[in-house]
Amino acid sequence: MNKAQLVEAIADKLGGRQQAAEAVDAVLDAIVRATVAGDRVSVTGFGSFEKVDRPARYARNPQTGERVRVKKTSVPRFRAGQGFKDLVSGSKKLPRGGEVAVKKAPKGSLTGGAAATVKKAAAKKTTKAAAKKVTAKKAAPTKRTAAAKKTTAKKTTAKKTTAAAAKKTAAKKTTAKKATAKKAPAKKATAKKAPAKKSTARTTTAKKATARKR
């Protein structure tokens, strides 16, 4: 059976030849890509595909018998499953045409089984931890900015209080200067009145002198 015959064999089950060809191509492509990447492709009841590394070795040419150096290489290998072996050997009867020859996969194997669930849980934990770290890093700058705002607010209030105190002191100085300026003319007036007393004293002495002469 070649690929075309395989497509014809499953066309009725998949609803047409085109759908069957696409399904076969997709399955084979997935198996090849996984095997090349070094993964082991295992199908329950059918077998497994895996990549095997062969070290460098010496071999003989079957035609000439000469010893030939063979380089290190990797080859694909298929190992048939026990159910496949039993059907081929005849220890088990092949099911009828309507039934599936390969056993159905057990529950959980199609989603990866217990190991896959454990890996998914671990991945979720790591993602949650990473998200917490990111949120903590984001929260720290906000706290710092709030503290910086508080300090700047304190500085501005201190500046305002100092400016108000400076204005009050300047107002006091100006009022004191005005008061002293107002008081100064009164002193000058009293000083001017003093010479009047001297003139009166002179008149009294003149009167006394005239009286004595008489």
Image (cartoon, rainbow, N blue to C red):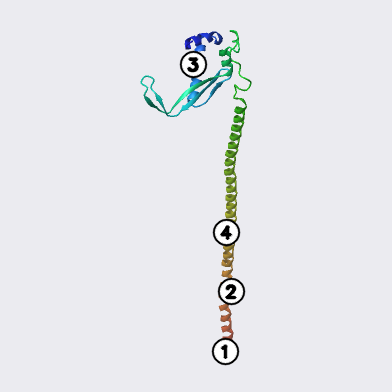
SS state under label 1: helix
Front disc: 3 or 4: 3
Q: Along the horizontal axis of the image, is 81 left or right of 62? A: right
**Mark 2 → mark 4, Cα distance in angstroms:** 37 Å
Residue type of the residue flagged with mark 2: Thr
**Mark 3 → mark 1, Cα distance in angstroms:** 155 Å
**Mark 4 → mark 1, Cα distance in angstroms:** 66 Å
Whichever of labels 2 and 1 marks the residue nearer the N terminus, that label is 2
* Residue tagged 4: 166
Whichever of labels 4 and 1 marks the residue nearer the N terminus, that label is 4
Q: Is residue 88 above or below residue 115?
A: above
SS state under label 3: helix
Residue type of the residue flagged with mark 1: Ala
Say if residue 214 shows up in the picture: no
Whichever of labels 3 and 1 marks the residue nearer the N terminus, that label is 3
Circle 1 packing at 10 Å, graded few (<14), some (14-19), many (20+), is: few
**Mark 2 → mark 3, Cα distance in angstroms:** 126 Å
At horizontal 49% and vertical 24% (from top left) the residue drawn is 35
**Mark 3 → mark 4, Cα distance in angstroms:** 89 Å
Whichever of labels 2 and 4 marks the residue nearer the N terminus, that label is 4
* Residue tagged 3: 25
Front disc: 2 or 4: 4
Residue 190 is tagged as 2
* Residue tagged 1: 209
At horizontal 46% and vertical 24% (from top left) the residue drawn is 75
